[in-house]
Image (cartoon, helix red, strand yellow):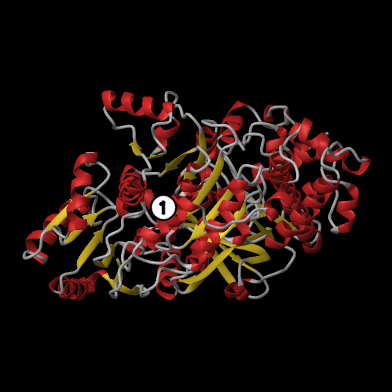
Amino acid sequence: MFLRNLSLPVTSIPGIGSAYSSRLARLGIRSSGDLLTHYPRDWEDREKKVTLREFGKGKVCTVVTVFAKEWVGYGAMRTMKIYIKDESAKASLMCFKRPWLEKLFITGEKYMIHGVFRYKYGEIQSSSFEAEAAASNNNFGKIIPVYPLTSGLKQNQLREFIKKTLDKYKNDIDDEIPFYIIEKNNLLKKSDAIKEIHFPSSIQMFEKAKKTLIYEELFYLEVMVAKRSLERKNKYTNVKDIKNEISGNFTDLQKRFIERLPFSLTKGQKEAVNEINRDIASNVPMARLLQGDVGSGKTLVSFLASLKVMEEKGQAAIMAPTELLARQHAENAARLLEPLGIKIAFLTGNIKAQGRRELLKNLASGGIDIIVGTHALFSRDVEYKNLKLAVIDEQHRFGVTQRALIMAKGENVHLLMMSATPIPRTLALTVFGDMDVSVIKDMPEGRKPVKTHLAKESNEKKVYDFVRGQLEKGRQAYFVYPLIDGQGDIKDAVSMAQRLSKEVFPKNKTALIHSKLPEEDKKKIMDDFRKGEIDILAATSVVEVGVDVPNAACMVIEHAERFGLSALHQLRGRVGRGSEQSYCFLVYSDEYTDDAKTRLLVMLNSSDGFVIAEEDLKIRGPGQIAGTEQSGYLILGIANPVRDIKELETARTDVFSIMENDPDLLLENHRIIAKVLNDAPPFSEVTL
């Protein structure tokens, strides 16, 4: 039986009644199989003795004798204090809010103690410890699992529940990967791996169990990627031969467009367009991820891709995550493409009924060549005459299901996903493993790297003075805040817009923009800012994506410690879009976490989006960056694609070798994979 087939409720395990069942449910544990896949978050090595005198080396793990105990303090603070000693030193146990420990510890008896000890008030002391009678030896002299818990559930209780479940089913758990793969990669059988991950017999066996379960999880993740890739390719024939024979040269319409531009395309843009042209001209729908740093010119490439499908009587839909960004794309498309006779339309959920009806009628009849909008592009009443290209900008903002909905609006639609948050190699191997990737590594000529500075909140006057100097030179500035309205000591956009206007920069015109403003107001404010009629824009992260004002020289991000790396990088990308030097100030408060410090230092030391993306992945995890959390993708139990890159690459090589040679999994060695996919599919909640 496969582990995921252990579907009996947890109440089938002795000792788990309705009360414990409801507590376990809060951890997502409802079945016996869930209990066994509730992997420890940590492991404690209680094989190694650490005496009381050695408390500075780590957690103490030693046999002690209780030689005295007393109550200390008064009222609600009254606490049991237990005095212990081993052969090296004496110490005390502070039993805060645990009065029952008075009866557990008997003077003169010996106990195994494990916990964190510190030197306080002239003695070695601990308030965080585990203990048991030395004679019982249940949790000492071995490696002990430490599990994620919930209110009303203790480590010892959860260990006992999992041990009972393991004892009941350990001989019934079948392997889920071919035996020759287990042998080749020096892995354990599944039943042994589950036993050793929860209750390791040695450090060596624990490491082997962890490697086995990580590999298996990544193996089936890559099986999903491989199946998706093969299904797409098998739908069409001779894909590679045809693509190689096709020229990626610019078409006549593309050449006319390029001739009208006041600048030349970068090498990266030209290469990307050539690759896209070959994809569109082949007999297989394109599935391409276009990566490029902030300001590298991805939108221009998407316009050129749209022109390619225009020449083949197709329509293009360009989807952006916010109305602000979608409107900017539509305005740029109209300015650049309408002189060529291309008909552009803009569609969001805020368009009034009468105008919407007329627009949809034109779209369905083929009177619109390129439509730009938000998620409204895949609304039920939106029909296309011949949708051939779907461009999804800032792809990490859309879930897998949303992408599928826009693709369903046409037949054999080409897909171009664009990201200014570069997808790290580790993640590209999983989420986008079946897509072709184009990378624009260069930036338009004449742009200077943005100079980044860190500033404490107490030094903000120096930042204001510097910005004032730039404003006097005729430049413009953004001030970005984490909140719209006030909350405690955290600065917000509304109140700071007033302060900037009245106290800090009274000679300059300041405007406020945030997500709660009506779209027409946002449009007018951004238009005025682009025209130079507004000097300072106080905002939330609504300006994070896509806003393009070349004259803006300063980006000041207040409470920068509260923003993620991706947001900080995107916000910094709003400046440095002209030929003059631009600046980004990350203003942070005195209280910040280690993660926040790491983010700020990464921003200070790097302007490379790929480096920043790798660091972001380490800090945040894969789901958030890939835009997959909202679609249920990458819900991993024990594997981490960043940490486990070696296992990921090994699993990918093994899987693609199997799937390319035996795509239907008919060989005897591979029947186990087919059986797992049929009887107990991993990631069954995922929409691909």
* Residue 677 or residue 495, whichever sits in front: 677
Which amino acid type is shown beneath numbered disc 1?
Arg
Image quarter (top left, top right, bottom left or bottom right) of the N terminus: top right
Residue 128, position as x, y percentages in the image: 54, 58
**Residue 73 appears in which quarter of the rendering?**
bottom left
Q: Is residue 263 visible?
A: yes
Drawn side of residue 519 relative to residue 259, left or right: left
Q: Nearer the viewer, residue 267 or 563?
A: 267
Residue holding disc 1:
78
Q: Is residue 93 visible?
A: no
Horizontal and vertical percent position of residue 358 = 32, 25
Q: Which residue in the rendered view is the most extreme toward the right?
A: 668
Query: What kind of element bears circle 1?
Result: loop
- Across and down, in percent, residue 47 comes to 75, 64
Q: Quadrant of residue 15?
A: top right
Q: Is residue 281 above or below residue 500?
A: above
- How many labels sit on residues? 1
Residue 181 lies left or right of residue 257; in this view the side is right
> In the image shown, does 446 or 135 lie closer to the viewer?
446
Image coordinates of residue 375 in percent, x first then y, are 41, 36
Q: Is residue 575 above or below residue 54?
A: above
Query: Would residue 512 be found to the left or right of residue 150 on screen?
Result: left
Asked where in the image residue 373 lies, by quadrant, the reply is: top left
* Vertical order, 452 against 244 (above or below): below
- Quadrant in which the C terminus is drawn: top right
Give whichever of 265, 15 is nearer the camera.
Answer: 265
